[in-house]
Amino acid sequence: MNSYGIFLALLGAVISVLLSGIGSAIGVGMGGEAAAGVVTEDPEKFGKVLLLQLLPGTQGIYGLLVAVFTFMQTGILGAPADVSFIQGLLYFAACLPMGIVGLWSALRQARAAVAGIAIVAKRPDQMGKAMIFPAMVETYALLALLTSVLAILNIPSINL
């Protein structure tokens, strides 16, 4: 078994989880700070601002999904597989879109969510519109997830 290939694949999976998880943690924290301010003034708005706060947390989940797919394909979870150095590099590269876009989009989505929380604070009837702004950022996290998963699932299983 080639330990360099497994190492590179594992490193890619870890980067995917780490970067998107960091972005989500910061983003959810930013949303929580803004939401706490609104709830202090009007506790009835808790449910609405909670939804907006949670949106930047999805990137961390997507990063974890990419890692799980990588673990399954490389035998880290399940049946052991021989992963060549080149395959390890391919897995590493396949994990990068989710890690990098996950970090960046979670931070940007947090800013849009905080703005949406400000909308709900003044105009709770505009909740639907307030959700659209951070949801648009989510599109790019989903595209990164799709790119990483498709790349991971299409890495040839033969030793390169």
Image: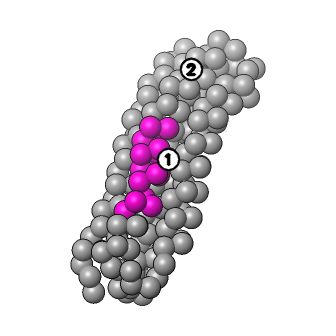
Judging by the rendered image, the residue that carries numbered circle 1 is 59
Q: Secondary structure at mark 1?
A: helix
Residue 126 screen position, x and y as percent: 73, 21
Residue 127 screen position, x and y as percent: 70, 25
Which of the numbered marks, if any, corresponds to residue 115? 2
Which of the numbered marks, if any, corresponds to residue 110? none
Q: Amino acid at mark 1?
A: Gln
Residue drawn at x 46%, y 76% is 73
Q: Secondary structure at mark 2?
A: helix
Residue drawn at x 34%, y 73% is 86
Residue 157 belongs to magenta span: no
Residue 116 screen position, x and y as percent: 61, 23
Q: Amino acid at mark 2?
A: Ala
The answer to which of 78 and 41 lies nearer the viewer is 78
Identify the image quadrant of residue 44. top right
Span of residues in magenta: 91-106
**Proximity of marks 1 and 2: CB atoms separated by less than 8 Å:** no
Residue drawn at x 40%, y 59% is 93
Circle count = 2
